[in-house]
Image (tube, grey):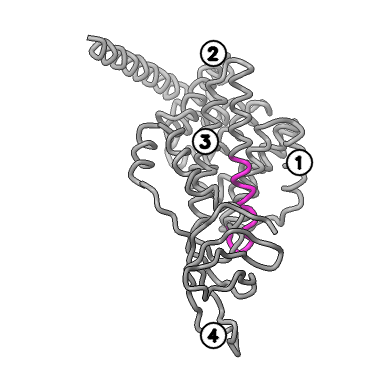
Amino acid sequence: MQQTAPVKARLWCIPEDAKDPEVARRKAYDVTIVGRDRAGLALAPDASGSMPSRIPFSRITAVDFDMDYDRFEVTKAMAKNDWAKAIRILSSVYSPLYPYLDLPENNGLEGAMDLGTTMMKFAMRTRRAAKTDAERTTASQQFDAAYKVFQACAKAEWSDLGALATLKGCRCMIAIDTDMAKTAARRIAAMDEPTPGDLAYGHYWLMKAELARLAGVTTNALDAAIKSLCFENKDVETFPDALMISAECYENLGEPYRARDVYFEVAKLFPGTDWADDAVARLEVILKTRKTEKREAATAESTFFGLEEDMNALSEALIKERKAAKEAAAKRAGEEEDENDN
């Protein structure tokens, strides 16, 4: 028996005396779950003494966990980029549910996935800002914490979110260290390849691209990145990263014009983000190397549709615009700091 912290929930169950479980009317029980074994849930005794001490999994059809917390505080913290506070609040709510996220049709899975995603993004931000070994170690620990959340969510085989959690967990593993990345590669290789439209499609091919890039197989990384971005061009969790990988691959394959164009689109599509900052930085490098100085040969399609543009000039203008915007923002921040000091 695995004992856990008490979890209040409403269980929707097939009645014990149901003659035909498929059509039987479900019965609701308000319970406190205190543990589980291979066959069912252990329940705390109720005041009336009428509740059984356990309910088998075979009878449970849905679960509503009691999740009472200040959602406004979380929203406010996220709006202020106080991710640590939001994570603290959400973890206190969802961590007791981790042992039970495999229960069918439960209302805790989606929130736990959101928590894991928030933790992963926070870890990415920490890693990006890290300048010392200690800070990089902190980022790895944050990725590991997010990975553990996704591990719990991945047990939900009843939902498409289960496969997505496996892939997000693999993303965290890749970020932790080389050995974990090898384990992630084996897990992804063992997964069934999703089809376009599946919830996990963009993430699956993004992870394939990441792993191929780590292995130094640029053509495979590019192929996987293109599959991810072509079919999931509205998923902000995968689309910008897939674009950035494809641009890097074009650079490595000696196709600077394509790399420049992709970096330009990333910077235009996602202003004010880390993706845009990285894209602008790579644009500057490409222009400084003068690899795109010679005008690219026009294609029949661009000539017919009148799409010929001076991408070098557009890229230079974008770089100047972003630099000016950053300088203005830094100046405003300095002025606000001076006002607060006074």
Give the camera-side residue of 291 and 271.
271
Give the camera-side residue of 34 and 150.
34
Tell me the chief SS of the magenta region. Answer: helix
**Reading the chain from its start, which is encountered first: label 2 or label 4?**
4
Local secondary structure at mark 1: helix
Sort mark 2 into few (<14), some (14-19) or many (20+) by Cα contacts within 10 Å.
few
Disc 3 and disc 4: Cα gap in Å?
Answer: 44 Å
Residue 325 seen anywhere in this rendered image of the structure: yes
Callouts 3 and 1 close, C-beta under 8 Å: no
Q: Residue 342 placed where, x, y %?
A: 22, 9
**Reading the chain from its start, which is encountered first: label 3 or label 1?**
3
**Placement of 22 over or under 71, stated as above or below:** below
Please give the residue where the numbered disc 1 appears in the rendered image. Answer: 183
Q: Is residue 153 one of those drawn in magenta?
A: yes
Disc 2 and disc 1: Cα gap in Å?
Answer: 39 Å
Sort mark 4 into few (<14), some (14-19) or many (20+) by Cα contacts within 10 Å.
few
Q: Amino acid at mark 1?
A: Thr
Callouts 3 and 2 close, C-beta under 8 Å: no
**Placement of 262 over or under 2, stated as above or below:** above
Sort mark 3 into few (<14), some (14-19) or many (20+) by Cα contacts within 10 Å.
some
Residue 294 seen anywhere in this rendered image of the structure: no
Please give the residue where the numbered disc 3 appears in the rendered image. Answer: 121
**Reading the chain from its start, which is encountered first: label 3 or label 2?**
3
Sort mark 1 into few (<14), some (14-19) or many (20+) by Cα contacts within 10 Å.
some
**Reading the chain from its start, which is encountered first: label 1 or label 4?**
4
Q: Amino acid at mark 2?
A: Lys
**Placement of 197 over or under 208, stated as above or below:** below
Magenta stretch: give its range.
146-160
Give the number of the disc on residue 288.
Answer: 2
Of the two numbered discs 3 and 2 in the rendering, the one whose residue sits closer to the viewer: 3
Of the two numbered discs 2 and 1 in the rendering, the one whose residue sits closer to the viewer: 1
